[in-house]
Structures are given as structure tokens and as C-alpha cells.
Amino acid sequence: MSLIEEYSQQYDWRAWPIIFDALPDLDGRLVLDLGCGIGDLAADLAARGARVIGVDMNDELITYAKERHIVNAQFRIGDLRTFRDPHIRADGIWSSFAAAYFPSPCDTIGSWLVHLRPGGWLALTEVDDLFGHQPLSNRTHELLNRYVEESLERSRYDFRMGRKLSGVLQQIGLVVTHEFTVPDAELSFSGPASPLVLEAWRTRFERMHLLREFCGSEFEHVRNNFLNCLKRDDHSCHATVRCCIASKKET
Ligand SMILES: C[S@@+](CC[C@H](N)C(=O)[O-])C[C@H]1O[C@@H](n2cnc3c(N)ncnc32)[C@H](O)[C@@H]1O
């Protein structure tokens, strides 16, 4: 399955309307979608009246997003750690499932504020504790925890970013207006996974080359143990999807 197909499928498992309903009015507003992927959220924001500029560093995803010809949405290649466009002054910034990729979130997300008008909003959505599912074997639990620590130490990905969103937004000088947990049929559910969700997790494990490298000969055990856990009637989960919305002070 390609990354485009994976991202398309994931869209249905997220509870996007809950987040959209918490945003200020979008009608006629300019919104940046940072880490826009294939443009699904840009399409939703545009359908709610916004003019959207989506930015992502993945060439293939941006090409696909452009080819959708979404009305009132344009897409650009850009690295969000260095992205600057002096001509953009947005009413809102949306960024979903991208914050965990930034090793210095205050620096990166703080740098986006030059593109936000005073009084504008910034909405971040991110998962917290992606591997937080039970019951797992002690060894799987230990390896996944060590991998999570290593990813953070090496500034690759912060698996615990969801819980940090509010702190980051406050540290960069914004006023947090909403903070909530969002249901998610793939990332945050209890009881047995549906066959489609299970397949999506299998695909995710296939894509995690660094996890495979980290676990070495134990990778198969970790993956199978995790997938078996998701199938169980007594599967429980403390992974959460968090959303935090904040506004930029008027002066
Ligand atoms: C998990 S996807 C989320 C896509 C979409 N926002 C969503 O919610 O479905 C993360 C996206 O962030 C992008 N990304 C990660 N780091 C980035 C960076 N430094 N600059 C630009 N895009 C980045 C990836 O290419 C990917 O499309």
C-alpha cells in the first residue's frame, strides 16, 4: 500500500468534525495547513469556507494534493522547520499529526507565528503514546519503550507529543482556548480492532524501518505481539489523540 493510500484510509478513522467545530469561523479566512500530506484537511477547511495554503516536504504527497484541484486550496513544497513566506499573513494555522516530527517544537512552531495575524488561531492535533496498547509481553513493552526514548534522544519523533501541545503553545506566547481529547478509530480504541484497522497497523509496522533495525531479530515478535494485542477482546488502550487550539494576542 502506498503512503497516499495509507493516508487516504486514515482520514475516515479520525474524528475531524469535532476539531473543525471548535475552530473560529472559517468563512473567507486564510488558513495555513502545515504538514498537509495529501490535502484531505485542506479540502475540509476549504469546504468550510477557508482559502487554504498547504505546505509539506513530501514531493509525492504535494503533487497528489495539487492534482486534486481542490477549489480554494493551493499546495507548496516546504520544510516546516525553515518555511518562510513574507507575503503570508494567515487568520489561522492548522497542523495535524506533524508536531511530533519536530525535535525543537517551540522553535519550529514558534517560527510559524510570523505568518499569523494578531488575534489569529493555531490548532495542533497529535497522538500521544502511539504504542500505548495492552496487553503486551514484557519484552515488547520494554523494546517499544526503549525505541520511544531513542527516537526522542535522536530528535526523530516525539511519541509523547500529544500531552505537550498545550505547554508548547503557551511557551511560544499563545493563549490556549481549547484543549481536548479526540476519539480515533485507529489510534485510540479498546476491544478488538476491525480487519481494516489491523491491516493498517500491519502496514505501519512494515513502514517503520528504524523500529525493525532497533529490534533486530526480535522485530517479528514485537510486531506479532502488538497485532495480536489489538485483536483481543480485552485489548485496552491509553494512547490518545489530543487537540489544542490557541490564539495570538492582539498586540
Ligand atoms: C502523519 S502525516 C499527517 C498528514 C495530515 N496533516 C493529516 O493529519 O492527515 C505528517 C505529515 O507531515 C509532513 N512533515 C513531517 N515533517 C515535515 C517537515 N519538516 N516539513 C514539512 N512537512 C513535514 C510529512 O511529510 C507528512 O505529510
Image: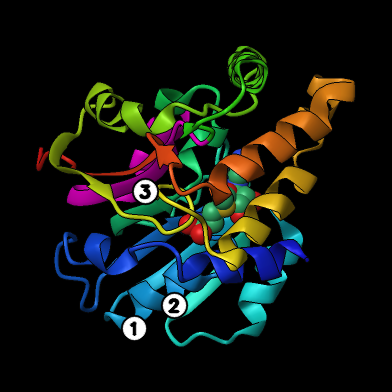
How is the protein colored in the picture? rainbow
Q: Nearer the viewer, mark 2 or mark 3?
A: 2
Say whether marks 1 and 2 touch (CB < 8 Å). yes
Find disc 2 in the rendering and name its residue.
Answer: 43
In front of the other: 116 or 97: 97
The three-letter amino acid code for the residue at tag 2 is: Ala
Q: Residue furthest right?
A: 217
Find disc 3 in the rendering and name its residue.
Answer: 115
Q: Is residue 49 left or right of residue 227?
A: left
In front of the other: 24 or 86: 24
Say whether marks 2 and 3 touch (CB < 8 Å). no
In front of the other: 217 or 97: 217
Q: Quadrant of the N terminus?
A: bottom right
Identify which residue is drawn at 20% across, 52% down.
Answer: 120
Mark-to-mark CA distance, 1 and 2: 6 Å
The three-letter amino acid code for the residue at tag 3 is: His
Mark-to-mark CA distance, 2 and 3: 20 Å
Q: Secondary structure at mark 2?
A: helix
In front of the other: 25 or 213: 213
Q: State whether residue 39 is above or below residue 57.
A: below
Q: Which residues are magenta?
A: 108-130
Q: Quadrant of the C terminus?
A: top left
